[in-house]
Image (cartoon, rainbow, N blue to C red):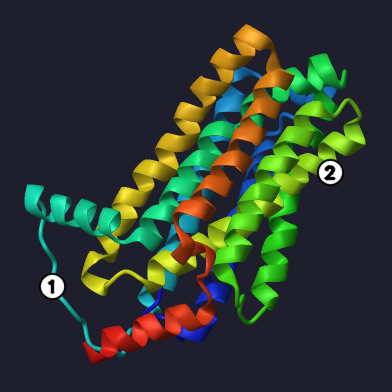
Amino acid sequence: MPNLVPREYLTNAVSLNTFMFQIGTILGPALTGILIGVSGSPESASLTNAELNAHIGIVYLINAVTFVAAILALMGISYRGKVTGSSGGIGVKPLIEGLRFTYNSRMIWSTMLLDFIATFFASARTMLPIVATEVLGVSAAGYGLLATAQSVGSVIAGSVLTLRKDIYHQGAVLLVSVAIYGIATALFGLSTSFVLAYFFFALTGAGDTVSTVIRGTIRQLMTPDHLRGRMTSVNMMFFMGGPQLGELEAGVVAAAFGAPFAIVSGGIATVLLTIWIAWKYPRLRNYTSDTAAEYLKNQATG
């Protein structure tokens, strides 16, 4: 992405990419339900297994066709610059090189730690069915509505970020957004009102989207071209591992102390560990657009 858009618009590009992903997570399941024809009406409930399988097959067919559009879009991308660096190939040596670079780059490493902490401790979505039924006392329809809150917050935050040209104090905004994510998670766990629960859950989506965009921008800018793939691979371990392990942690704590305690304690832990990262990594705290520009200048001059 840094080689496809001007550097000053990279934040917008990352924001737009995140925004489109969130739109897809909202529209995709909704369109799937419509196409399958299972909407809860008497007519749809009377579908035979053969008819249901046929409808599901249509969904997969449409999904396959949409990849044609994605392939055409990729074919339309052109990079007019020079390819810098060389591939390290596949093996233990390039893997170690990628791990070493990620760990030694304090800026990138701190953003990955922040990502892991937030997704590990603040896993409110895992507890959503319990909160909806046992705490808020809503029906399946209420649960479905509550489940949209996080995506709605993400879309709103993504829209705002897409329209902004740049975020100057990116490090500070990143830390604040993760702290807001943690605070909103804790308040969501304390909420007994559906309206408040929806608002705070939407706020977690907004905070997560802001932090995702800034983390992505920092990593893309501060990684050399020939190491960007390996950095992304290491990041995927944090990105995928955090939520999965977080679901386990939330389930264990909820089994022992209840779902509200698991959510609230996770939110508080996220805030406290964000403060610790802000203290331990002052470069991240003080990171601005000027920091990125100076780093790129030093890279260009060797």
The picture places residue 137, in percent across and down from the top left corner, at: 88, 18
Figure quadrant of residue 227:
bottom left
Three-letter amino acid code of the residue under disc 1: Ser
Left or right, 167 with respect to 150, comes to: left
Q: Earlier in the sequence, mark 2 or mark 1?
A: 1
Q: In the drawing, what numbered circle is on residue 214?
A: none
Marks 2 and 1 close (CB-CB < 8 Å): no
Q: Give the distance between the C-alpha atoms of the residues marked 2 and 1, in whole angstroms.
A: 48 Å
Q: From the viewer's side, name the closer residue of 152 and 276.
A: 276
Q: Residues within 10 Å of mark 1 (few under 14, many from 20)?
A: few
In the rendered view, tell whether residue 128 sits above or below residue 271: above
Q: Which residue is mark 2?
A: 199
Q: The residue tagged with tag 2: helix, strand or loop? A: helix
Q: From the viewer's side, name the closer residue of 24 and 222.
A: 222
The picture places residue 260, in percent across and down from the top left corner, at: 73, 21
Q: The residue tagged with tag 1: helix, strand or loop? A: loop
Q: Which residue is mark 1?
A: 86
* Residue at 16% from the left image edge and 50% from the top image edge: 95
